[in-house]
Image (spheres, rainbow, N blue to C red):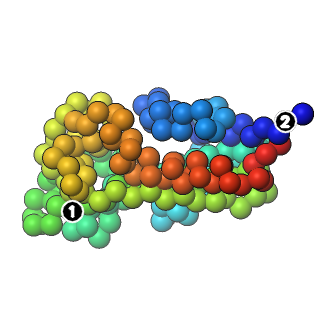
Amino acid sequence: MAASLKVVTFVTGNAKKLDEVRRIIGDTIPFQSVKLDLPELQGEPEDISKEKARLASRQINGPVLVEDTCLCFNALKGLPGPYIKWFLEKIGHEGLNNLLVAYEDKSAYAQCVFSLALGPDSEPLTFVGRTEGKIVPPRGPPTFGWDPIFQPDGYTQTYAEMPKEEKNRISHRGKALDKVKAHFATNINLID
């Protein structure tokens, strides 16, 4: 019988994030998705992601992949960082821009940390992707988080204005998932 990759459970309740991950991963990694009620943790992005993977793997009792995404403003020494979800929810795109009104520096970076736990007792592995850019007034459809205000370096469009394929190729999430795919392609511990 031929060996096959274990099915990994990607933990998310965000349909747009799931769609983006499916587009980037394609059929290279067998995965399913599930929404779990995990606590909202505070701390450094890699620590948050690893702890979420530990908690999720205990609930699933199997391999899980979790993600934590940050949008970090350099003028604010990395804030809002992993708290971007709540900042966006409370103050919106305009409010996020207003946080930088008093600063000349509008540079920022988008960071994505995926953590893979192979089981409840395994130490999670992390895969980090980062894209440098700047914060701009909202442009493009406001349909996916903070995409309308983040313009990657070297581009004239925000994430929201880009074709999905182009965004996925250069984005923080795409870069992190490329590392996940490379790990799956070379790591025999993921074979049944």
Which quadrant is home to the C terminus?
top right
Residue at x 52%, y 62% (from the top left corner): 46
127 left or right of 166 in image? right
Foreground residue, 64 or 43?
A: 64
Q: Is residue 111 above or below residue 85?
A: below
Q: Which class describes the residues within 10 Å of circle 1: few (<14), some (14-19), or many (20+)?
A: many
Q: CA distance from mark 1 to mark 2?
A: 49 Å
Where residue 113 appears, x then y in whole percent? 50, 55
Please tell me which residue lies in front, 186 or 88: 186
14 or 176, which is in the foreground?
Answer: 176
Camera-near label (1 vs 2) is: 2
- Residue 187: image quadrant is bottom right
Q: Residues at badges 1 and 2 in contact (C-beta under 8 Å)?
A: no
Q: Is residue 69 visible?
A: no
* In the rendered image, the vertical position of residue 65 relative to residue 78, given as above or below: above
Residue 188 against residue 76 in the figure, above or below: above
- Residue extending farthest to the front is 2
Which residue is found at the position 10% from the left and 66% from the top?
A: 104
Amino acid type indicated by mark 2? Ala
| Quarter of the image with the N terminus in it | top right
Helix, strand or loop for disc 2: loop
Q: Quadrant of residue 17?
A: top left
Q: Position of residue 154 (x, y in %)?
A: 21, 55
- Tag 1 secondary structure: strand
Residue behind mark 1:
107
Q: Amino acid at mark 1?
A: Ser
Residue at 67% x, 45% y: name it: 64
The residue that label 2 is drawn on is 2
Is residue 73 visible in the rendered image? The answer is: yes
Image point (49%, 53%), residue name:
176
Q: Residues within 10 Å of mark 2 (few under 14, many from 20)?
A: few
Q: Position of residue 122 (x, y in %)?
A: 76, 58
